[in-house]
C-alpha cells in the first residue's frame, strides 16, 4: 500500500522527533517517496542533514533558504504529496492548523495542500488535555484532517499519561490502513475469518485440542485488512498477535465459535474459515480436576459430536462467498471436493498436513484451490501470507464473476 506513495512528513519540535527519523527510513523501505519539512524548532532537536540523508531529498525548513528546486516551494510541496503526515505534531502546530495560520514553511504547506492530512499529536499530557488543544483537534477532525491518537505512557517531562508519539510500526500500520480504506481492492467488503483451533474442556485444567497455531487464518485476516476490508477475526486460543484493525472475537469452544460466527454472518460478504475446529467434545465436563485413583488404570472420555459451523453457514448462505479449508492426511482432492458439496462452499483450500512445509504451525503452506465446478488450482510451497494474498485474489475474481451472472 505504501509502495510508490509520495508522503510529506511535517516534523515539529517535540522530543519524539527521534522516532520520526526511523519512520522516514521505514517508509522508504516500504517503497514510499518521502520529503521532510521541519520547523525551526524541530531543527534545534535534530539536524536537517539527518532527515535529508535519510529521506534522500533536501529537508525543507524555510521559505527563504534560496533553493531553486521548486518555483514556489510551499505550493510545489503541497501539490507533490499524496498525503502529509505531521509527526510529532506539537500543540503549537495543531493550533496554527486550526486557525489557518501560515507563518513558516510547514504551516504554509499545510494550508496550501488539498491532499489527505494526518496529524500525530505528541506532547505533555496537560497540554494534550487542555481544552484549547481538545477544541483544535475537534476543529481539525471536523475539517477532515485525520488524528492518530497518541499513546499513553511515560513522557519526557517525567509524567505519565496520554501524549506519547505512537511507535513507528503503529504509525506505519495506521498509514497502511488509511490508504487501504481509500484504495484497497477489498474496501467496503466485510470479511469473517476464523482462525486457530477450538478447545473442548475435560476438567478445569485439561482440554481436547489440536495443533493449529492460527498462522494461516491470521495471515488471511492481515492481507484482507491491508486491502481495505473490514475484518471480524473469530479466533481460538493462539500465541499470535492479531493484526491491527481487526475486530477480534476470542472464543474457546466450537459452540462459542459457532455463536460468534452466527452473530456477524448475516452482514458479511465473505467468510474464510481457516480455523481447525474440534469435531468432538467431552460429554461431561468435570467440575474439579480429575484425579488418578487406581495406579495403572486408564480412563475413557465419552465424546459427543460438535456442530459443523461451516455446514451450518453453508445451509444459510445468501450473499456470502464461503471458503473452507480442508486439512487432510490422505485422499486430499477427493475429501476436499466432498466438503465443497457437503458444506455448500464456493471454494475450498485443501492442504495435506502431513507434507513438509504444509499444515499446522509452519510459516509456509502447500495448497490446492478447489471450486464447485470441479476445477483445481495447485500452488507451490509459499509463505502463508502469499497463500492468503492469492486466495483473496481468487475470492475477488470468483465473487465478481458470480455477481455479474
Ligand atoms: N469446520 C467447521 N466445523 C466443524 C468442523 C470443521 O466449521 N465442526 C470447518 C473448518 O473450519 C474447515 C472445514 O470445515 O474450514 C473443513 O474442516 P476439516 O477439519 O478439514 O474437516 P471436517 O469437516 O471436520 O471433516 P473431517 O474431520 O471428517 O475431515
Image: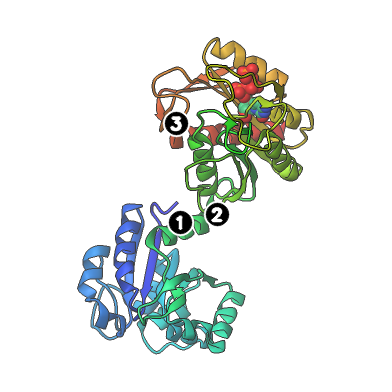
Residue pointed to by mark 2 = 245
Which is nearer the N-term, disc 2 or disc 3? 2
Residue 82 falls in which quadrant of the image?
Answer: bottom left
Which residue is more in the foreground, 385 or 256?
A: 256
Residue 59 to residue 91: above or below: above
Question: Quick check: 390 left or right of 66?
Answer: right
Q: CA distance from mark 2 to mark 3?
A: 24 Å
Q: Residues within 10 Å of mark 3 (few under 14, many from 20)?
A: some
Looking at the picture, how far across and down is residue 38, in whole percent? 32, 78
Looking at the picture, how far across and down is residue 354, in whole percent? 46, 17
Which is nearer the N-term, disc 3 or disc 1? 1
Question: Quick check: 128 left or right of 398?
Answer: left
Label 3 close to label 1 by CB (< 8 Å): no
Residue 371 to residue 84: above or below: above
Looking at the picture, how far across and down is residue 339, in whole percent? 66, 19
> Which residue shows up at 54% across the image and 89% down it?
132
Mark 2 within 8 Å of ligand 1, using the beta carbon: no
Which is nearer the N-term, disc 1 or disc 2? 1
Which secondary structure lies at badge 2?
Answer: loop
Residue 163 to residue 180: above or below: below
> Which residue shows up at 63% across the image and 31% down it?
202
Residue pointed to by mark 1 = 173
**Where residue 361 is drawn, which disc sits there?**
3
Amino acid at each position: 500500500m505504501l509502495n510508490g506513495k509520495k508522503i510529506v512528513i511535517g516534523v515539529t519540535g517535540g522530543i519524539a522527533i527521534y522516532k520520526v527519523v526511523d519512520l522516514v527510513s521505514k517508509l522508504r523501505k516500504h517503497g514510499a517517496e518521502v520529503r521532510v519539512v521541519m520547523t525551526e524548532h524541530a531543527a534545534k532537536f535534530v539536524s536537517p542533514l539527518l532527515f535529508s540523508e535519510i529521506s534522500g531529498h533536501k529537508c525543507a525548513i524555510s521559505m527563504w533558504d534560496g533553493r531553486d528546486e521548486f518555483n514556489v516551494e510551499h505550493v510545489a510541496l503541497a501539490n507533490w504529496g499524496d498525503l502529509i503526515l505531521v509527526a510529532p505534531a506539537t500543540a503549537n502546530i495543531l493550533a496554527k492548523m486550526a486557525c489557518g495560520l501560515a507563518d513558516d514553511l510547514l504551516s504554509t504547506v499545510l494550508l496550501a495542500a488539498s491532499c489527505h492530512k494526518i496529524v500525530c499529536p505528541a506532547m505533555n499530557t496537560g497540554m494534550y488535555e487542555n481544552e484549547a488543544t481538545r477544541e483544535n483537534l475537534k476543529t481539525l477532525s471536523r475539517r477532515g484532517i485525520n488524528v492518530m491518537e497518541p499513546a499513553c505512557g511515560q513522557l519526557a517531562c517525567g509524567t505519565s499519561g496520554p501524549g506519547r508519539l505512537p511507535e513507528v510500526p503503529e504509525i506505519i500500520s495506521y498509514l497502511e490502513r488509511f490508504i487501504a480504506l481509500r484504495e484497497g481492492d477489498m474496501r467496503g467488503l466485510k470479511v469473517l475469518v476464523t482462525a486457530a483451533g477450538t478447545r473442548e474442556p475435560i476438567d478445569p485444567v485439561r482440554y481436547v485440542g489440536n495443533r493449529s497455531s492460527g498462522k494461516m487464518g491470521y495471515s488471511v485476516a492481515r492481507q484482507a485488512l491491508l486491502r481495505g476490508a473490514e475484518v471480524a477475526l473469530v479466533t481460538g486460543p493462539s500465541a499470535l498477535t492479531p493484526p491491527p484493525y481487526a475486530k477480534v472475537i476470542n472464543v474457546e469452544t466450537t459452540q462459542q465459535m459457532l455463536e460468534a460466527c452466527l452473530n456477524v454472518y448475516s452482514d458479511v460478504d465473505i467468510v474464510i474459515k481457516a480455523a481447525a475446529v474440534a469435531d468432538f467434545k467431552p460429554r461431561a465436563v468435570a467440575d474439579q480436576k480429575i484425579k488418578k485413583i487406581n495406579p495403572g488404570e486408564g480412563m475413557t472420555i465419552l465424546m459427543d459430536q460438535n456442530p459443523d459451523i461451516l455446514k451450518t453457514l453453508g445451509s444459510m448462505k445468501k450473499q456470502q462467498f464461503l471458503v473452507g479449508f480442508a486439512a487432510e492426511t490422505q485422499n486430499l482432492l477427493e475429501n476436499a471436493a466432498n466438503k465443497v458439496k457437503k458444506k455448500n462452499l464456493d471454494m475450498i483450500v485443501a492442504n495435506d498436513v502431513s507434507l513438509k512445509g504444509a499444515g499446522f504451525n509452519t510459516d509456509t503452506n502447500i495448497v490446492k484451490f478447489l471450486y464447485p465446478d470441479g476445477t483445481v488450482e495447485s500452488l507451490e510451497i509459499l509463505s502463508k501470507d502469499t497463500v492468503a494474498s492469492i486466495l483473496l485474489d481468487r475470492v475477488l475474481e470468483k465473487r465478481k464473476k458470480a455477481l455479474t451472472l
